[in-house]
Image: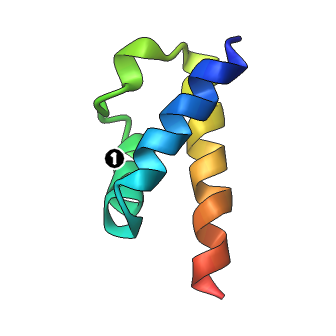
Amino acid sequence: MDHQKLAQCLEILCQSGCETVNATIKAMENNQAINLSQELSDEEYQIVLHELKTIMAVYTH
């Protein structure tokens, strides 16, 4: 697993803004491809999804 690749993926997504991140989470939960998904293994994909949910949880409270 390439931790730097995961960090870059998260950084790119988060720079896109909350609406894009929420749309990405929804797409990932529905197993729809995202722009960066072709670069991620299944395990990395799940890690990115988990991290995005964790990051966005801060904004829901």
The N terminus lies in quadrant:
top right
Q: Amino acid at mark 1?
A: Ala
The quarter of the picture where residue 16 lies is: bottom left
Q: Position of residue 38 (x, y in %)?
A: 36, 15
The quarter of the picture where residue 48 lies is: top right
Label total for image: 1
Q: Dot 1 corresponds to which residue?
A: 27
9 lies above or below 18? above
In the current view of this chain or complex, which residue is farthest to the bottom?
Answer: 61
Viewer can see residue 46: no
Element under label 1?
Answer: helix
42 lies above or below 55? above
Q: Position of residue 35 (x, y in %)?
A: 28, 30
Instruction: Choose between 4 and 52: the one closer to the eye.
Output: 4
The quarter of the picture where residue 43 lies is: top right
**Residue at 33% across, 46% down:** 27
**Residue at 37% across, 50% down:** 24
**Residue at 32% across, 58% down:** 20
Left or right of residue 35, residue 45 in this image = right
The C terminus lies in quadrant:
bottom right
46 lies above or below 41? below
**Residue at 33% across, 67% down:** 19
Packing grade of label 1 (10 A; few <14, some 14-19, many >=20) is some
Q: Position of residue 33 (x, y in %)?
A: 30, 30
